[in-house]
Image: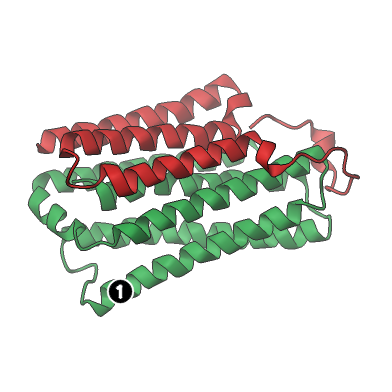
Chain colours: A red, B green
Amino acid sequence: MPEIPEPMNAQPMNARPVTRRPVARERVTIVWIGLMAATCISTWLLSKDAVSPRIGVLGIFLLAAIKIRFVMLDFMELRDAPIRVRLAFETWIVVVTGLILGFWFATG
Amino acid sequence: MDGVWVFIGADAVIFAILFMSFMKDRLKAPALFEASRHTLNVNLGGIDTLILLTSSWLVALGVGAAKRGELDRVPRFLLGGVLTGCAFVVSKSTEYAEKFLAGIAPATDAFYMWYFTLTGIHLAHVMVGTSLLAYLWTRARRGSVTMTVTECVASFWHLVDLLWIVLFPLLYLQR
C-alpha cells in the first residue's frame, strides 16, 4: 500500500467527489471474479475423487498461493508498496505453500 | 501505517507457524486426519471462502472510492463489508453447532483439536475485523474518518481473508 503524504492523512474524507468509476471497470472487480472462479475450481472440482490426490492437492495449494498473491498485490495494494515490504509478504506465500506441500509429499 | 504492517506481518508469521504445526501433527496420523476431514462440510467451507473474498473486494472498492473522493459511495461499500463479515460469523456458528450436535468437540481427536483451534482463532479475527469495519462505517457516514485509519482497517481485513484462503484447503480439502 503506498504511503499517503501526511497532510492528506490528517484530513477527514469530506472532500467533494472528483470522478465516479463504475464498479465493473475497477481492477479489483476483475481480480475478485478470478478469485471466485479459482475458489469454485478448488472446492468443487480439484477436491473430488475423480482427480488424483497428487494433482488435486498440488493444484489446490498452487491456486491458493496465486489467490493470496492477488489479495496482497491488489486488495492490500502491495503492488505499489516499498520493495522490502512486498518481498517480505511474497516470501511468506512461497514459504507457507512450499512447506505445506513438502509436508504433504513427505506424508505420502 | 508502518506499525500496522508490522502487526499484520507478525500475525501472518504466527499463523504460518500454526499451519506448520498442524502439518507436523498430520504427518504422525494421516489416516485419522483424513477420516475426520471427511466429516467436515466442504460446501459450507467453500461458501465461507466466497463470502470473505466478496467482503475483501467490497472493502477494496471502498478504499478506492475514498482515494478518488467519491465519499458518498464509501459507507455503502463498508456496510457491504460489515454484512458479509456477519454472514461469515453466522455460517461458522452454524458449522460449529452442527459439529456439537453430532457430538464432535475439540477433545474428539487431534484433527478436531486443530480444527477448532485454527478456525476459532480465525473467527476471533473475523469478529474483530467486522467490528472495526462497523466503526469505520459509522465514521464514514459522518465524513469523519481519515484515509490512514481506513487503509489500516482494510489491510487487516484483507489479512483475515488471505489467512482463510490457506486455512480452507488445509483443513477441508487436503486429502
**Residue A65: percent from left, percent from top:** 38, 33
**Residue A38: percent from left, percent from top:** 41, 40
Quarter where residue B82 is shown: bottom right
Residue visible at 84% across and 55% down?
A: B143
Residue visible at 70% across and 47% down?
A: B62
Q: In which chain is the residue bearing label 1?
A: B
Q: Amino acid at mark 1?
A: Glu
Q: How many numbered marks does the figure carry?
A: 1
Query: Which residue in the protein does label 1 denote?
Result: B98
Quick check: B84 left or right of B72?
Answer: left
Quarter where residue B61 is shown: top right
Quick check: A38 left or right of A106?
Answer: right
Residue extending farthest to the front is A50
**Residue A60: percent from left, percent from top:** 30, 38
Q: Is residue B11 visible?
A: no
Q: Is residue B85 visible?
A: yes
Please tell me whether residue B74 is drawn above or below residue B104 in the rendered image. Answer: above
Between B83 and A22, the residue placed more toward the observer is: A22
Q: Quadrant of the N terminus of chain B?
A: top right
Q: Residues within 10 Å of mark 1 (few under 14, many from 20)?
A: some
Secondary structure under tag 1 reads: helix
Residue visible at 33% across and 32% down?
A: A62
